[in-house]
Image: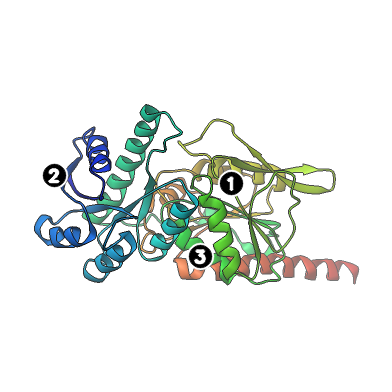
Amino acid sequence: MPPIQVLIVDDSVVVRRLLCDALASTTEIKVAGTASNGAIALARIPQLNPDIITLDIEMPGLDGIQTLIEIRKLYPQLPVVMCSTLTERGAATTLDALAAGASDYVTKPSNSSSLANAMDQLRRELVSKITSLAGRRRSSSAPVPAISAANRTASADHVVDILAIGTSTGGPNALGEVIPQLPQDLPVPVVVVQHMPPLFTRMLADRLNSRSRLSVREAETGKSLEPGQVWIARGDYHLTVVRKGLQTVLELNQDSPENYCRPAVDVLFRSVARTYGANVLAVVMTGMGSDGARGAAHIREAGGEVLVQDEASSVVWGMPGAVVDSQCASKICPLPEISQEIVRRVLAGRTQASLGARTARI
């Protein structure tokens, strides 16, 4: 297969060179061309026919968001990776870009970090995101594996005490569709890992909180888990849940990354399986890689259930696809149906348990 053709759009000559150098490390990717602003980029797309675009957010004239909106009008399926800064403004604008249709984002090296380490991280992230996003666009979809009868949990008598969600690429928009649809009286707490750096996770929690009937906050060590709360893992910290007396509380740590991620879905899923046993409902949504697959196996072994987002509605089907491949999925759902399925399973188990208790008293 010929190399993936990339158009790099950034008003900074230095950044354009950094991105070109980062992508020169692999033969799978070729820089088809560069553009110094949004207007030039829009003119070059039909000339170069790129497979994917990297797009700076802050540019003079037509800025990144405005350019993205025009790209989406003309090329709705063309993957776009935003290049952001690790600042509050950069995080806010990145979330705006994702809401406007950006496929994913990378953060530019900051002045406070080692340039060599920062460039290595940028190269790794950019190459993996480009190959995943553009590779999916150029390849035909493989048939979705069937879920075996052994993995179709009969949820009518399955009591759910916690909902755990893991996601990555495309996750902010997926969470923005699922979390606001959950009812205010949801009788279980919700814990979430979204692969994002510090600051971005707080901004994401704030945005979801403003749109949701549930309380959505960035996770804090020592906070008790209560129904109706949504806790999002803090960037650069693993999130776990532990029993302390009669309470279950959140804990954050900076143990080694897993699957190149911190926070990692596997870490959270293992902890909920260990703490809640069979009374777990997990959801794995759009994202690159396989983070969450091993954790889903722990949840299934403990007797819990795992829903996954389907391929058609996922930006990238890496994470949910890995759960399906490992035979740990209880059900595959299109994104618009996930919130309904969550509520159905949470309420069904509680209704059945209530009826059982009432029958026993009689």
Query: Would residue 318 appear left or right of 141 to someone viewing this image?
Result: right
Which residue is under mark 1?
234
Question: What amino acid is found at the position of numbered circle 3 in the picture?
Answer: Gly
Front residue (pair 99, 357): 99
Q: What residue is rendered at 37% in x and 30% in y?
A: 115
Q: How many marks?
A: 3
From mark 3 to mark 1, how far is it between C-alphas? 17 Å
Q: Nearer the viewer, mark 3 or mark 1?
A: 1
User: Do we see residue 152 in this rendering?
Assistant: no
Q: Kindly give the residue lying farthest to the right in the view shown.
A: 361
Front residue (pair 251, 332): 251
x and y percent of residue 24 in the render?
21, 35
Display coloring:
rainbow
Q: Are marks 3 and 1 in contact (CB under 8 Å)?
A: no
Would you identify the image quadrant in which residue 281 lies?
bottom right
Which residue is under mark 3?
176
Query: Would residue 115 appear left or right of 207 to someone viewing this image?
Result: left
Q: What residue is rendered at 55% in x and 46% in y?
A: 296
Front residue (pair 339, 354): 339
Question: What amino acid is found at the position of numbered circle 2 in the picture?
Answer: Pro
What label sits on residue 2 in the rendered view?
A: 2
Label 2 residue SS: loop
* Disc with the residue nearer the chain's start (3 vs 1): 3
From mark 2 to mark 1, how far is it between C-alphas? 39 Å
Q: What residue is rendered at 12% in x and 61% in y?
A: 46
Q: What residue is rendered at 23% in x and 60% in y?
A: 38
x and y percent of residue 204 in the render?
53, 57
x and y percent of residue 142 in the render?
29, 54
101 to 200, vertically: above or below: below
